[in-house]
Amino acid sequence: MSQPIHLQDQNDRPTGQAMWRGTRGLCPSCGQGKMFRGYLKVSDHCPNCDEELHHQRADDGPAYLTILIVSHLAAPILLAYFIAFRPSAMTMIAIFGLGTVISSLLLLPRIKGAFVGFQWARRMHGFEGAGAETH
């Protein structure tokens, strides 16, 4: 007995693998070509397998998730640091301001890559085409 079509789609494009590849900035299909042609600009096609990537619709999702993660990590650390060392306000602003900016800049492209990988694996927003499959 064959699987329903929606289960076949999930099995031939593993979501976890596609998201992990995207997190590393690689094509969710082949895992070899670079997904980004700039800091956050997704390439139209994978340079390795020619998978179309222009369908992605990550929009504001990666930014919201980045803010959520960074703020939930920074808030308890900030409180613990303040209670333990009682630094001046300027020291807190300098340390945690710089830390949150750097953390956000490091996380944002990785989260966007995971979003694109998820969309590709789930055949969302135009990724349902037959294109290159998981290698």
Image (cartoon, rainbow, N blue to C red):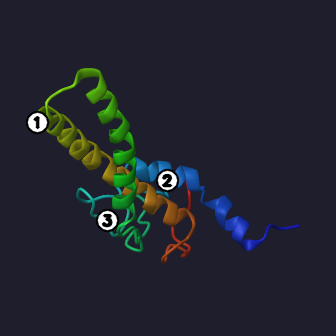
**Lower sequence index among marks 3 and 1:** 3
- Separation of marks 3 and 1 at Cα, in angstroms: 41 Å
Q: Image quarter for residue 129?
A: bottom right
- Numbered circle sitting on residue 90: 1
Give the structural element (helix, strand or loop) at label 1.
helix
Contact flag, marks 2 and 1 (Cβ < 8 Å): no
Residue at 44 percent of width and 55 percent of height = 114
Q: Image quarter for residue 76?
A: top left
Q: Residue furthest top?
A: 85
Image depth: mark 2 or mark 1 in front? 1
CA neighbours of label 3 inside 10 A, class few (<14), some (14 to 19), many (20+): some
Q: Nearer the viewer, residue 89 or 66?
A: 89
Left or right: where 27 falls relative to 92: right
- Numbered circle sitting on residue 43: 3
Image position, residue 49 (x, y; %): 43, 61
Give the amino acid type for the residue marked by disc 3 in the picture.
Ser
Q: To which residue does mark 2 refer?
A: 19
Contact flag, marks 3 and 1 (Cβ < 8 Å): no
- Separation of marks 3 and 2 at Cα, in angstroms: 16 Å
Q: How many marks?
A: 3
Q: Quadrant of the N terminus?
A: bottom right
- Numbered circle sitting on residue 134: none
Give the structural element (helix, strand or loop) at label 3.
loop
Give the amino acid type for the residue marked by disc 1 in the picture.
Met
**Lower sequence index among marks 2 and 1:** 2
Give the structural element (helix, strand or loop) at label 2.
helix
